[in-house]
Amino acid sequence: MSSSSAGRLYRILRFDQAVQIFESEELHLAHPSTWEDPYEVRLQHEASNKLFGQCWCTRGVSDAMWRIYSPNHLGVRISTSTRKLKAALAAGTKSMGGILRLGNVDYKNQHDINLEMRAIQSELQVKFSTDRAMDALFLKREAFDHEAEYRAVIHVPNASEEEIRDGVKIKVNPHKLIDNILLDPRAPKELAAAFAFYFVEKLQYKQRVAPSVLYKSQTPLMVEAE
């Protein structure tokens, strides 16, 4: 069962990556070839080099996600909503002459993934549609379903060679986009305090900044012998 509320999104980043969003006032969307799963770029077509994406998680409480994306205990979790993410990306995408798609990733077994990919391939060979081509980036194998992904994918028809290599950046207001910031629950107290100080005092972030309580000790439940 998911622990997230409807429409809530989460992303665990290194501290410096989160700071960069505030300092640059930009979100970075990468080319799928930079992601670890080779199936992300299995389908090749005329728009392949012009698609960029960013991945969020719909699960607010996840031991697996902290361990994967904050292996050194130095990560922070930013949160937003599907509505705010769409609003933040829409204007920038439009200025690039691009197309924006947002939605949940659909996790399927290997057999069904292969069938769906071939179906998309067949349709594109008859009549190419960027929207249909984007469908492939919302499919993943079940081995990755712990990520509970929600994706923003954009098609930038006039992407430069530099953007194809390094990704595209879209201007946003991080103070409006990001609802709250949680610090890695395993971070040393002194470091967590320093991170919180930086967000609040240096970046003037006004929303909640606090350590995650995922591993906080609970009051023992005692069973008394009769």
Image (cartoon, grey):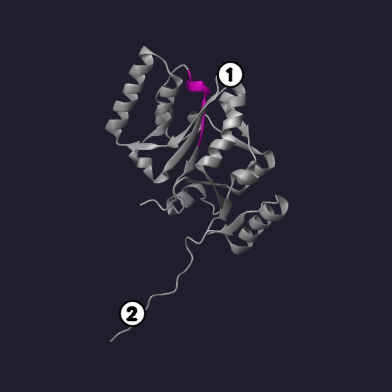
Identify the magenta region.
Answer: 47-54
Which SS class for mark 1?
A: loop
Q: Residues within 10 Å of mark 1 (few under 14, many from 20)?
A: few
Does residue 74 appear in this view?
A: no
Which amino acid is tagged 2?
Answer: Val
Location of residue 169 by image quarter: top right
Location of residue 86 by image quarter: top right
Left/right of residue 184 with respect to residue 194 in the rendered view: left
Query: How far across and how far down the image is residue 25, in percent?
Result: 66, 39
Of all residues, the one furthest to the bottom in this rendering is 226
Q: Residues within 10 Å of mark 2 (few under 14, many from 20)?
A: few
Nearest the eye: 12 or 98: 98
Image point 61% across, 32% down: which residue? 170
Does residue 63 appear in this view?
A: yes
Left/right of residue 98 with respect to residue 194 in the rendered view: left
Query: How far across and how far down the image is residue 32, in percent?
Result: 48, 30
Of all residues, the one furthest to the right in this rendering is 202
Q: Where residue 223 is drawn, which disc sits there?
A: 2
Image point 39% across, 46% down: which residue? 146
Quadrant assignment for the C terminus: bottom left
Nearest the eye: 83 or 166: 83
Q: Which residue is mark 1?
A: 158
Which amino acid is tagged 1?
Answer: Asn
Nearest the eye: 220 or 191: 220
- Work out whether 7 lies above or below 224: above
Query: How far across and how far down the image is residue 207, in percent?
Result: 62, 54
Residue 34 among magenta residues? no
Q: Where residue 121 is drawn, which disc sits there?
A: none
Give the alpha-carbon distance from disc 2 to disc 1, as whole Å: 67 Å
Image point 42% across, 15% down: which residue? 128
Query: How far across and how far down the image is residue 217, in percent?
Result: 47, 69
Residue 50 among magenta residues? yes
